[in-house]
Image: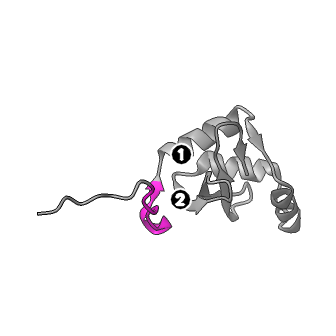
C-alpha cells in the first residue's frame, strides 16, 4: 500500500464550508484598537451606498462569524463579515488580514 502525500499548500475549502470565529475575533480586536486601513475602493463603495464608518464598526462588532473569501493578490487571507448597519440594513464587510493592520 503506497503512502499518500498531501500537497504543501492545499486548496482552501469553499467559503460555504469555512466559517471561522478566530479570524473574526482578530478583525474585531484590530478594529477596536484602530489598527485598520480603509482602501480607496472601500471608501468609494461606502459613499455610493450611503454607509458611514459607524455602520461598518457596528456591523463588525455585531458579527458572529467571518467567512473565508479566498486570498488577495499578495496571498493574504480575505474574510466576509456579515452584520447590520445602525439603521438595520444588512451589510457584508470584506476584510483582509495581514501581519500589520486589518484592511477593509
Mark 2, Cα crowd under 10 Å, few <14 / some 14-19 / many 20+, is many
Q: Residue at x 45, y 63 (%)?
A: 11
Picture coordinates of residue 87, whole percent (x, y):
74, 59
- Rendered location of residue 59, percent (x, y): 66, 53
* x and y percentages locating residue 15 in the rendered image: 49, 65
**What residue is shown with label 2?**
68
Residue corresponding to mark 1 = 23
How many marks overall?
A: 2
Quadrant in which the N terminus is drawn: bottom left
Q: Nearer the viewer, residue 47 or 67?
A: 67
Q: Which mark is residue 61?
A: none
Q: Residues within 10 Å of mark 1 (few under 14, many from 20)?
A: many
Left-right relation of 87 to 17:
right
Residue 81: x %, y % from top left: 60, 56
In the displayed orientation, state which residue is furthest to the top. Answer: 33
Q: Are marks 1 and 2 in contact (CB under 8 Å)?
A: yes
Residue at coordinates 69% horizontally, 48% vertically from top-left?
58
Of helix, strand and loop, which one carries label 2?
strand
Whole-number angstrom distance, CA of label 1 to CA of label 2: 9 Å
Q: In the structure shown, which secondary structural element does the residue marked by tag 1 occupy?
A: helix
Question: Magenta residues, as a range?
Answer: 9-19
Q: Nearer the viewer, residue 97 or 72?
A: 72
Amino acid at each position: 500500500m503506497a503512502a499518500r502525500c498531501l500537497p504543501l499548500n492545499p486548496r482552501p475549502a469553499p467559503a460555504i464550508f469555512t466559517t471561522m470565529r478566530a479570524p473574526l475575533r482578530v478583525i474585531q480586536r484590530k478594529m477596536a484598537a484602530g489598527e485598520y486601513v480603509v482602501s480607496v475602493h472601500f471608501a468609494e463603495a461606502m459613499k455610493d451606498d450611503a454607509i458611514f464608518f459607524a455602520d461598518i464598526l457596528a456591523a463588525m462588532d455585531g458579527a458572529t462569524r467571518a467567512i473565508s473569501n479566498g486570498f488577495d493578490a499578495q496571498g493574504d487571507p480575505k474574510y466576509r463579515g456579515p452584520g447590520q448597519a445602525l439603521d438595520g440594513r444588512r451589510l457584508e464587510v470584506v476584510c483582509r488580514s495581514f501581519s500589520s493592520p486589518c484592511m477593509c
